[in-house]
Protein backbone atom coordinates (compact mmCIF):
# COMPACT_ATOMS: atom_id res chain seq x y z
CA UNK A 1 0.00 0.00 0.00
CA UNK A 2 1.30 3.44 -0.94
CA UNK A 3 2.35 5.74 1.89
CA UNK A 4 -0.12 8.34 0.59
CA UNK A 5 -3.05 5.99 -0.04
CA UNK A 6 -4.24 5.98 3.56
CA UNK A 7 -3.88 8.47 6.39
CA UNK A 8 -3.85 7.11 9.93
CA UNK A 9 -5.12 8.89 13.04
CA UNK A 10 -2.77 10.94 15.21
CA UNK A 11 -1.08 9.45 18.25
CA UNK A 12 0.53 11.72 20.82
CA UNK A 13 3.01 10.18 23.22
CA UNK A 14 5.02 11.80 25.99
CA UNK A 15 8.61 10.68 25.40
CA UNK A 16 10.13 12.94 28.07
CA UNK A 17 11.55 10.23 30.32
CA UNK A 18 12.77 8.16 27.38
CA UNK A 19 14.46 11.16 25.73
CA UNK A 20 16.49 12.25 28.75
CA UNK A 21 17.25 8.80 30.21
CA UNK A 22 20.76 8.92 28.81
CA UNK A 23 22.78 11.44 26.85
CA UNK A 24 24.30 10.35 23.56
CA UNK A 25 27.80 11.48 22.68
CA UNK A 26 28.31 11.56 18.93
CA UNK A 27 29.97 14.03 16.58
CA UNK A 28 27.55 16.28 14.73
CA UNK A 29 27.58 19.39 12.58
CA UNK A 30 26.10 22.49 14.24
CA UNK A 31 24.78 23.75 10.90
CA UNK A 32 22.89 20.49 10.33
CA UNK A 33 21.36 20.77 13.81
CA UNK A 34 20.30 24.36 13.09
CA UNK A 35 18.66 23.17 9.87
CA UNK A 36 16.56 20.73 11.92
CA UNK A 37 15.67 23.52 14.38
CA UNK A 38 14.66 25.84 11.53
CA UNK A 39 12.42 23.15 10.03
CA UNK A 40 10.50 22.95 13.30
CA UNK A 41 10.13 26.60 14.33
CA UNK A 42 9.55 28.37 11.02
CA UNK A 43 6.02 27.00 10.92
CA UNK A 44 5.04 29.19 13.85
CA UNK A 45 7.25 32.17 12.97
CA UNK A 46 5.88 32.23 9.43
CA UNK A 47 2.27 32.24 10.62
CA UNK A 48 3.01 35.17 12.98
CA UNK A 49 5.07 37.04 10.40
CA UNK A 50 8.14 36.91 12.66
CA UNK A 51 11.54 36.99 10.95
CA UNK A 52 14.12 34.37 12.00
CA UNK A 53 17.86 35.11 12.00
CA UNK A 54 20.47 32.46 12.83
CA UNK A 55 24.07 33.56 13.42
CA UNK A 56 27.09 31.45 14.33
CA UNK A 57 30.29 33.25 15.30
CA UNK A 58 33.37 32.54 13.20
CA UNK A 59 35.32 30.99 16.06
CA UNK A 60 32.68 28.29 16.71
CA UNK A 61 33.83 24.96 15.22
CA UNK A 62 31.55 23.32 12.69
CA UNK A 63 31.63 19.94 14.44
CA UNK A 64 31.15 19.19 18.12
CA UNK A 65 30.48 16.06 20.17
CA UNK A 66 27.30 15.70 22.21
CA UNK A 67 23.59 14.88 22.00
CA UNK A 68 22.42 16.64 18.86
CA UNK A 69 18.73 15.78 19.18
CA UNK A 70 18.35 16.86 22.81
CA UNK A 71 20.26 20.11 22.30
CA UNK A 72 18.08 20.78 19.27
CA UNK A 73 14.97 20.13 21.36
CA UNK A 74 16.07 22.78 23.87
CA UNK A 75 16.57 25.36 21.11
CA UNK A 76 13.24 24.50 19.47
CA UNK A 77 11.31 24.90 22.75
CA UNK A 78 13.01 28.18 23.66
CA UNK A 79 12.55 29.58 20.16
CA UNK A 80 8.88 28.59 20.20
CA UNK A 81 8.43 30.36 23.54
CA UNK A 82 10.26 33.47 22.34
CA UNK A 83 8.16 33.60 19.16
CA UNK A 84 5.04 33.44 21.37
CA UNK A 85 6.31 36.49 23.30
CA UNK A 86 7.16 38.45 20.15
CA UNK A 87 4.41 40.53 18.59
CA UNK A 88 6.35 41.62 15.52
CA UNK A 89 9.91 41.98 14.27
CA UNK A 90 12.67 39.37 14.44
CA UNK A 91 13.85 36.53 16.65
CA UNK A 92 17.61 35.94 16.58
CA UNK A 93 19.55 32.80 17.54
CA UNK A 94 23.27 33.37 18.02
CA UNK A 95 25.87 30.70 18.77
CA UNK A 96 28.96 32.04 20.57
CA UNK A 97 32.21 30.46 21.76
CA UNK A 98 32.99 30.90 25.46
CA UNK A 99 35.94 29.69 27.53
CA UNK A 100 37.38 26.19 27.34
CA UNK A 101 36.41 24.11 30.35
CA UNK A 102 38.08 20.83 31.43
CA UNK A 103 38.95 19.81 27.88
CA UNK A 104 35.50 20.83 26.72
CA UNK A 105 34.33 23.84 24.73
CA UNK A 106 31.60 25.93 26.30
CA UNK A 107 29.13 27.37 23.81
CA UNK A 108 26.42 29.96 24.38
CA UNK A 109 23.14 29.69 22.50
CA UNK A 110 21.42 33.06 22.85
CA UNK A 111 17.88 33.66 21.62
CA UNK A 112 16.76 37.28 21.43
CA UNK A 113 13.33 38.75 20.73
CA UNK A 114 13.89 41.87 18.64
CA UNK A 115 10.17 42.71 18.41
CA UNK A 116 8.16 45.19 20.45
CA UNK A 117 5.08 44.91 22.60
CA UNK A 118 6.64 42.44 25.03
CA UNK A 119 6.41 42.83 28.81
CA UNK A 120 10.06 41.90 29.15
CA UNK A 121 10.37 42.21 32.94
CA UNK A 122 7.53 39.78 33.64
CA UNK A 123 8.72 37.32 30.99
CA UNK A 124 12.31 37.39 32.27
CA UNK A 125 11.23 36.80 35.88
CA UNK A 126 8.92 33.93 34.91
CA UNK A 127 11.57 32.12 32.84
CA UNK A 128 14.31 32.49 35.44
CA UNK A 129 12.02 31.27 38.23
CA UNK A 130 11.06 28.23 36.18
CA UNK A 131 14.56 27.21 35.07
CA UNK A 132 16.19 27.81 38.47
CA UNK A 133 13.54 26.28 40.73
CA UNK A 134 12.30 22.77 40.02
CA UNK A 135 9.24 23.41 42.21
CA UNK A 136 8.01 26.05 39.76
CA UNK A 137 5.81 24.68 36.98
CA UNK A 138 4.52 26.10 33.71
CA UNK A 139 0.85 26.92 33.43
CA UNK A 140 -1.11 24.72 31.04
CA UNK A 141 -0.65 21.18 29.81
CA UNK A 142 0.02 21.68 26.11
CA UNK A 143 3.11 20.82 24.07
CA UNK A 144 4.61 24.26 24.87
CA UNK A 145 4.57 23.49 28.61
CA UNK A 146 5.96 20.01 28.02
CA UNK A 147 8.64 21.47 25.78
CA UNK A 148 9.83 23.93 28.43
CA UNK A 149 9.75 21.23 31.11
CA UNK A 150 11.79 18.92 28.88
CA UNK A 151 14.24 21.76 28.12
CA UNK A 152 14.80 22.41 31.82
CA UNK A 153 15.57 18.75 32.45
CA UNK A 154 17.88 18.50 29.42
CA UNK A 155 19.85 21.62 30.43
CA UNK A 156 20.33 20.17 33.90
CA UNK A 157 21.28 16.77 32.49
CA UNK A 158 23.92 18.48 30.33
CA UNK A 159 25.23 20.47 33.33
CA UNK A 160 24.29 23.62 31.45
CA UNK A 161 23.16 27.02 32.72
CA UNK A 162 20.16 29.16 31.81
CA UNK A 163 19.65 32.90 32.15
CA UNK A 164 16.95 35.23 30.84
CA UNK A 165 17.80 38.95 30.72
CA UNK A 166 16.20 42.19 29.64
CA UNK A 167 18.45 44.05 27.20
CA UNK A 168 18.86 47.87 27.19
CA UNK A 169 16.85 48.11 23.97
CA UNK A 170 13.91 46.39 25.75
CA UNK A 171 14.45 43.11 23.94
CA UNK A 172 14.46 39.77 25.80
CA UNK A 173 17.43 37.41 25.58
CA UNK A 174 17.62 33.86 26.91
CA UNK A 175 21.06 32.28 27.21
CA UNK A 176 21.83 28.59 27.48
CA UNK A 177 25.50 27.75 28.08
CA UNK A 178 26.49 24.14 27.33
CA UNK A 179 29.92 22.45 27.48
CA UNK A 180 30.48 20.16 24.48
CA UNK A 181 33.44 18.05 23.49
CA UNK A 182 35.43 18.66 20.31
CA UNK A 183 38.20 16.65 18.72
CA UNK A 184 40.41 19.72 18.67
CA UNK A 185 39.83 22.59 21.11
CA UNK A 186 41.82 24.92 18.84
CA UNK A 187 39.60 24.28 15.84
CA UNK A 188 37.81 27.26 14.34
CA UNK A 189 34.93 27.34 11.90
CA UNK A 190 36.35 27.11 8.41
CA UNK A 191 34.79 26.79 4.97
CA UNK A 192 37.16 26.42 2.06
CA UNK A 193 36.36 28.80 -0.77
CA UNK A 194 34.79 26.61 -3.46
CA UNK A 195 36.68 27.91 -6.50
CA UNK A 196 38.74 30.81 -7.79
CA UNK A 197 35.66 32.04 -9.69
CA UNK A 198 33.80 32.52 -6.38
CA UNK A 199 36.40 34.78 -4.74
CA UNK A 200 36.12 38.55 -4.26
CA UNK A 201 32.67 38.99 -5.74
CA UNK A 202 30.59 42.15 -5.54
CA UNK A 203 27.20 41.38 -4.05
CA UNK A 204 24.02 43.38 -3.41
CA UNK A 205 21.14 42.39 -1.13
CA UNK A 206 17.68 43.93 -1.52
CA UNK A 207 15.32 42.78 1.23
CA UNK A 208 12.47 44.50 3.04
CA UNK A 209 13.67 42.83 6.27
CA UNK A 210 16.78 44.89 6.98
CA UNK A 211 17.91 42.72 9.93
CA UNK A 212 17.83 39.61 7.73
CA UNK A 213 19.79 41.47 5.03
CA UNK A 214 22.51 42.41 7.53
CA UNK A 215 22.74 38.81 8.79
CA UNK A 216 23.14 37.58 5.21
CA UNK A 217 25.73 40.32 4.61
CA UNK A 218 27.91 38.97 7.43
CA UNK A 219 27.84 35.45 6.03
CA UNK A 220 28.74 36.61 2.53
CA UNK A 221 31.57 38.78 3.82
CA UNK A 222 33.02 35.66 5.45
CA UNK A 223 33.68 34.42 1.91
CA UNK A 224 35.66 37.59 1.10
CA UNK A 225 32.94 39.32 -0.89
CA UNK A 226 32.19 43.02 -1.04
CA UNK A 227 28.56 43.20 0.07
CA UNK A 228 26.20 46.15 -0.31
CA UNK A 229 22.69 46.39 1.10
CA UNK A 230 20.29 48.10 -1.26
CA UNK A 231 17.19 50.07 -0.19
CA UNK A 232 14.55 47.97 1.55
CA UNK A 233 11.83 50.19 0.07
CA UNK A 234 12.31 50.81 -3.63
CA UNK A 235 10.85 54.03 -4.99
CA UNK A 236 9.89 54.60 -8.64
CA UNK A 237 12.81 55.77 -10.79
CA UNK A 238 15.26 55.04 -7.96
CA UNK A 239 16.29 51.48 -8.68
CA UNK A 240 19.91 50.97 -7.49
CA UNK A 241 22.74 50.71 -9.99
CA UNK A 242 23.64 47.02 -10.37
CA UNK A 243 25.70 47.21 -13.54
CA UNK A 244 28.89 46.04 -11.79
CA UNK A 245 27.22 43.53 -9.38
CA UNK A 246 28.18 39.84 -9.60
CA UNK A 247 25.35 38.40 -7.47
CA UNK A 248 22.04 40.06 -6.66
CA UNK A 249 20.08 38.70 -3.67
CA UNK A 250 16.43 39.80 -3.81
CA UNK A 251 13.62 38.87 -1.43
CA UNK A 252 10.53 37.34 -2.98
CA UNK A 253 8.43 40.26 -1.73
CA UNK A 254 10.64 42.80 -3.49
CA UNK A 255 10.79 40.69 -6.64
CA UNK A 256 6.99 40.37 -6.71
CA UNK A 257 6.67 44.16 -6.79
CA UNK A 258 6.87 46.32 -9.91
CA UNK A 259 10.65 45.98 -9.83
CA UNK A 260 10.64 42.28 -10.68
CA UNK A 261 10.66 42.94 -14.40
CA UNK A 262 13.43 45.54 -14.00
CA UNK A 263 15.55 42.97 -12.17
CA UNK A 264 15.11 40.37 -14.91
CA UNK A 265 15.84 42.94 -17.62
CA UNK A 266 19.05 44.10 -15.92
CA UNK A 267 20.11 40.52 -15.35
CA UNK A 268 19.77 39.78 -19.05
CA UNK A 269 21.91 42.83 -19.89
CA UNK A 270 24.66 42.45 -17.28
CA UNK A 271 24.94 38.68 -16.81
CA UNK A 272 24.79 38.88 -13.00
CA UNK A 273 23.75 35.87 -10.91
CA UNK A 274 20.24 36.37 -9.53
CA UNK A 275 19.27 34.68 -6.23
CA UNK A 276 15.73 34.72 -4.82
CA UNK A 277 15.50 34.75 -1.02
CA UNK A 278 12.37 33.48 0.73
CA UNK A 279 11.24 32.43 4.18
CA UNK A 280 11.33 28.67 4.57
CA UNK A 281 7.64 27.87 5.08
CA UNK A 282 5.94 30.65 3.23
CA UNK A 283 7.34 30.64 -0.31
CA UNK A 284 5.31 32.74 -2.73
CA UNK A 285 5.84 30.37 -5.63
CA UNK A 286 6.83 26.81 -6.35
CA UNK A 287 10.58 26.14 -6.36
CA UNK A 288 10.55 25.17 -10.03
CA UNK A 289 8.80 28.39 -11.05
CA UNK A 290 11.31 30.42 -9.04
CA UNK A 291 14.27 28.65 -10.58
CA UNK A 292 12.91 29.33 -14.06
CA UNK A 293 13.53 33.01 -13.32
CA UNK A 294 16.45 32.91 -10.93
CA UNK A 295 19.85 31.24 -10.91
CA UNK A 296 19.18 29.91 -7.42
CA UNK A 297 16.71 30.00 -4.56
CA UNK A 298 17.56 30.06 -0.83
CA UNK A 299 15.38 30.10 2.26
CA UNK A 300 15.74 32.03 5.51
CA UNK A 301 17.26 31.55 7.97
CA UNK A 302 20.57 30.88 6.23
CA UNK A 303 23.88 29.73 7.69
CA UNK A 304 27.46 29.56 6.44
CA UNK A 305 26.95 26.10 4.96
CA UNK A 306 23.96 27.39 2.98
CA UNK A 307 26.08 30.14 1.45
CA UNK A 308 28.89 27.71 0.62
CA UNK A 309 26.41 25.38 -1.11
CA UNK A 310 24.99 28.36 -2.99
CA UNK A 311 28.42 29.49 -4.23
CA UNK A 312 29.16 25.94 -5.36
CA UNK A 313 25.85 25.88 -7.21
CA UNK A 314 26.55 29.20 -8.93
CA UNK A 315 30.28 28.87 -9.62
CA UNK A 316 31.17 25.21 -9.13
CA UNK A 317 33.83 23.73 -6.90
CA UNK A 318 37.30 22.90 -8.11
CA UNK A 319 37.95 19.17 -8.17
CA UNK A 320 34.59 18.03 -6.71
CA UNK A 321 31.75 17.55 -9.18
CA UNK A 322 29.51 15.80 -6.66
CA UNK A 323 29.95 18.32 -3.84
CA UNK A 324 26.52 19.92 -4.42
CA UNK A 325 24.92 16.63 -3.32
CA UNK A 326 26.71 16.45 0.02
CA UNK A 327 24.29 18.57 2.02
CA UNK A 328 21.21 16.49 1.22
CA UNK A 329 23.07 13.26 1.89
CA UNK A 330 24.08 14.49 5.33
CA UNK A 331 20.73 15.91 6.41
CA UNK A 332 18.61 13.71 8.63
CA UNK A 333 15.22 15.22 7.87
CA UNK A 334 14.33 18.23 5.69
CA UNK A 335 10.71 18.87 6.66
CA UNK A 336 10.26 21.80 4.27
CA UNK A 337 10.59 19.60 1.21
CA UNK A 338 8.21 17.00 2.59
CA UNK A 339 5.63 19.70 3.31
CA UNK A 340 5.88 20.98 -0.25
CA UNK A 341 4.86 17.50 -1.50
CA UNK A 342 1.48 17.93 0.21
CA UNK A 343 0.96 21.57 -0.69
CA UNK A 344 2.16 22.83 2.72
CA UNK A 345 -0.82 21.11 4.37
CA UNK A 346 0.59 20.60 7.87
CA UNK A 347 -2.20 18.32 9.09
CA UNK A 348 -1.88 16.03 6.07
CA UNK A 349 1.90 15.92 6.43
CA UNK A 350 1.61 15.11 10.14
CA UNK A 351 -0.61 12.12 9.31
CA UNK A 352 1.74 10.97 6.55
CA UNK A 353 4.62 11.00 9.02
CA UNK A 354 2.52 9.01 11.50
CA UNK A 355 1.81 6.44 8.79
CA UNK A 356 5.49 6.22 7.89
CA UNK A 357 6.48 5.59 11.51
CA UNK A 358 3.78 2.92 11.83
CA UNK A 359 4.33 1.19 8.50
CA UNK A 360 8.12 0.98 8.71
CA UNK A 361 8.78 0.77 12.47
CA UNK A 362 9.91 -2.89 12.04
CA UNK A 363 11.79 -2.35 8.77
CA UNK A 364 15.06 -3.52 10.33
CA UNK A 365 13.41 -6.87 11.18
CA UNK A 366 12.05 -7.12 7.65
CA UNK A 367 15.48 -6.56 6.14
CA UNK A 368 17.12 -9.08 8.50
CA UNK A 369 14.47 -11.72 7.77
CA UNK A 370 14.77 -11.33 4.00
CA UNK A 371 18.58 -11.52 4.17
CA UNK A 372 18.55 -14.62 6.40
CA UNK A 373 16.23 -16.44 3.98
CA UNK A 374 18.20 -15.35 0.92
CA UNK A 375 15.30 -13.38 -0.57
CA UNK A 376 17.52 -10.69 -2.08
CA UNK A 377 15.12 -9.65 -4.85
CA UNK A 378 12.31 -9.09 -2.33
CA UNK A 379 14.74 -7.13 -0.16
CA UNK A 380 15.71 -5.01 -3.18
CA UNK A 381 12.06 -4.20 -3.95
CA UNK A 382 11.38 -3.37 -0.29
CA UNK A 383 14.41 -1.06 -0.24
CA UNK A 384 13.31 0.57 -3.51
CA UNK A 385 9.84 1.38 -2.12
CA UNK A 386 11.25 2.60 1.21
CA UNK A 387 13.82 4.81 -0.55
CA UNK A 388 11.05 6.58 -2.48
CA UNK A 389 9.05 7.26 0.68
CA UNK A 390 12.12 8.61 2.50
CA UNK A 391 12.95 10.98 -0.34
CA UNK A 392 9.35 12.20 -0.48
CA UNK A 393 9.18 13.08 3.23
CA UNK A 394 12.67 14.64 3.20
CA UNK A 395 14.66 11.97 5.12
CA UNK A 396 17.69 12.22 2.86
CA UNK A 397 20.46 10.62 4.90
CA UNK A 398 18.50 7.43 5.49
CA UNK A 399 17.31 7.35 1.87
CA UNK A 400 20.95 7.44 0.73
CA UNK A 401 21.77 4.49 3.00
CA UNK A 402 18.75 2.53 1.70
CA UNK A 403 19.85 3.27 -1.88
CA UNK A 404 23.21 1.65 -1.07
CA UNK A 405 21.36 -1.34 0.41
CA UNK A 406 19.21 -1.62 -2.72
CA UNK A 407 22.35 -1.76 -4.87
CA UNK A 408 23.93 -4.40 -2.62
CA UNK A 409 20.78 -6.55 -2.75
CA UNK A 410 20.68 -6.24 -6.54
CA UNK A 411 24.30 -7.42 -6.84
CA UNK A 412 23.87 -9.97 -4.00
CA UNK A 413 27.07 -8.56 -2.49
CA UNK A 414 27.06 -10.31 0.89
CA UNK A 415 29.85 -8.17 2.34
CA UNK A 416 28.09 -4.90 1.48
CA UNK A 417 24.70 -6.27 2.58
CA UNK A 418 26.12 -7.13 6.00
CA UNK A 419 27.78 -3.71 6.27
CA UNK A 420 24.65 -1.69 5.51
CA UNK A 421 22.08 -3.79 7.37
CA UNK A 422 24.14 -3.62 10.57
CA UNK A 423 24.09 0.19 10.54
CA UNK A 424 20.49 0.53 9.36
CA UNK A 425 18.78 0.21 12.74
CA UNK A 426 20.73 3.04 14.43
CA UNK A 427 20.23 5.34 11.45
CA UNK A 428 16.50 4.53 11.31
CA UNK A 429 16.09 5.26 15.05
CA UNK A 430 17.86 8.62 14.73
CA UNK A 431 15.69 9.56 11.73
CA UNK A 432 12.51 8.64 13.63
CA UNK A 433 13.57 10.78 16.60
CA UNK A 434 14.10 13.78 14.31
CA UNK A 435 10.68 13.24 12.71
CA UNK A 436 8.96 12.87 16.09
CA UNK A 437 10.55 16.12 17.30
CA UNK A 438 9.18 17.90 14.25
CA UNK A 439 5.71 16.34 14.61
CA UNK A 440 5.49 17.72 18.16
CA UNK A 441 5.61 21.23 16.74
CA UNK A 442 3.25 20.56 13.85
CA UNK A 443 0.70 19.47 16.45
CA UNK A 444 1.26 22.63 18.49
CA UNK A 445 0.66 24.93 15.52
CA UNK A 446 -2.20 22.79 14.18
CA UNK A 447 -4.36 21.99 17.26
Image: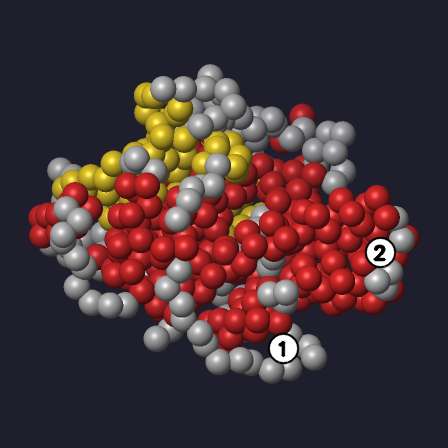
Tally the marks: 2
Q: Which mark is residue 409?
A: 2
* x and y percentages locating residue 170 in the rendered image: 14, 44
* Residue most extreme to the top: 186
Numbered badge on residue 356: none
**Quadrant (top left/top right/bottom left/bottom right) for the C terminus:** bottom left
Towards the viewer: 266 or 99: 99
In the rendered image, residue 373, in percent from the top left (x then y), is placed at: 84, 62
Q: Is residue 141 above or below residue 400?
A: below
The picture quadrant where one finds residue 390 is: bottom right
Q: Residue at x 23, y 39 (%)?
A: 162
Q: Quadrant of the N terminus?
A: bottom right
Find numbered disc 2 in the image and state the secondary structure of the residue it sits on: helix
* Front-lying residue, 357 or 338: 357
Q: Which residue is mark 1?
A: 4
Q: How is the image coloured?
A: secondary structure
Residue 139, percent across and down? 17, 64
Give the left or right position of residue 221, taking residue 99 as reference: right
The numbered mark, 1 or 2, whose residue comes first in the sequence reads 1
Q: Is residue 304 visible?
A: no
Amino acid sequence: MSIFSKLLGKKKNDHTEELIASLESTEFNINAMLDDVANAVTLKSGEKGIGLIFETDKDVPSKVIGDRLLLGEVLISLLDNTIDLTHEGDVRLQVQRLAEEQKKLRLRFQITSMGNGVDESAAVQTLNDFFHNENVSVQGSGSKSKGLLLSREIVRKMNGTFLAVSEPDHSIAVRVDIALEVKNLQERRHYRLPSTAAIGLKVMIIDEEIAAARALQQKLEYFRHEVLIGPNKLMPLHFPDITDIDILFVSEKVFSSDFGEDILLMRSKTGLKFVLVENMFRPAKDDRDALDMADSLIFKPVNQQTILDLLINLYGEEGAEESHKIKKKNQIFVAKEGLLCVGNDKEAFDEILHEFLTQYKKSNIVFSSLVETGKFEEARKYAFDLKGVLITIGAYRLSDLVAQMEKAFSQQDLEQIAKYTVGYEDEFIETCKAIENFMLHIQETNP
